[in-house]
Amino acid sequence: MERVYPALTSQFVLLMLASSVTSQISAEELTAVANYIQSDTYRAFESYITVAVFYPALSFVMRLGFWGLGLLLFPRRRRLGTPL
């Protein structure tokens, strides 16, 4: 049972890293982009809807990126389902 905890904590750390990076980008950059679009077009609703649609797509792409980076940095040493 004690072998499960390091795997769970490493997954939790990766999840926190991905969500914090995505939140930082969305809070500053995407809001600034929405404000810039709004100042040029005078359409507040459409610019924020665009940003709201772009945010989950960015989160998904970053999650896939961190997953791929994790596979490159930490290759699996054994096949799943085999005894330790």
Image (tube, rainbow, N blue to C red):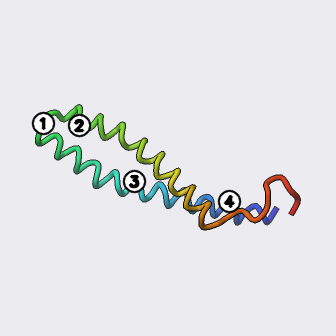
Type of residue at label 1?
Answer: Thr
Which mark is nearer the camera, 1 or 3? 1
Res 68 → quadrant: bottom right
Q: Earlier in the sequence, mark 1 or mark 3?
A: 3
Locate the C terminus and report the quarter of the image it occupies. bottom right
In primary-sequence order, the first of circles 2 and 1 is 1
The residue carrying mark 3 is 23
Q: CA distance from mark 2 to mark 1?
A: 9 Å
* Label 1 packing within 10 angstroms: few (<14), some (14-19), many (20+): few
Q: Label 3 vs label 4: CA separation? A: 22 Å
| Relative vertical location of residue 46 with respect to residue 62 in this rendering, above or below | above
What residue sits 46% from the left and 52% below the top? 62
Task: Give the structural element (helix, strand or loop) at label 3.
Answer: helix
Marking on residue 8: 4
At 28% from the left and 53% from the top, the residue drawn is 29
Residue drawn at (70%, 62%) of the image: 7
Q: Are marks 2 and 1 in contact (CB under 8 Å)?
A: yes
Give the labeled residue for mark 2: 47
Q: CA distance from mark 1 to mark 3?
A: 26 Å
Residue 48, located in which quarter of the rendered image? top left
Task: Measure the alpha-carbon separation of dots 2 and 4.
Answer: 39 Å
Q: Secondary structure at mark 1?
A: helix
Q: Position of residue 14 (x, y in %)?
A: 56, 60
Q: Estimate the spatial distance between the alpha carbons at disc 3 and disc 2, rounded to whole Å.
A: 18 Å
Q: Which numbered tag is attached to residue 41?
A: 1
Q: Nearer the viewer, residue 72 or 82?
A: 72
**Three-letter code for the amino acid on which mark 4 is drawn:** Leu
Task: Provide residue 61's location: percent of width, then percent of height.
Answer: 46, 48
Which circle's residue, 3 or 4, is located before the other in the chain? 4
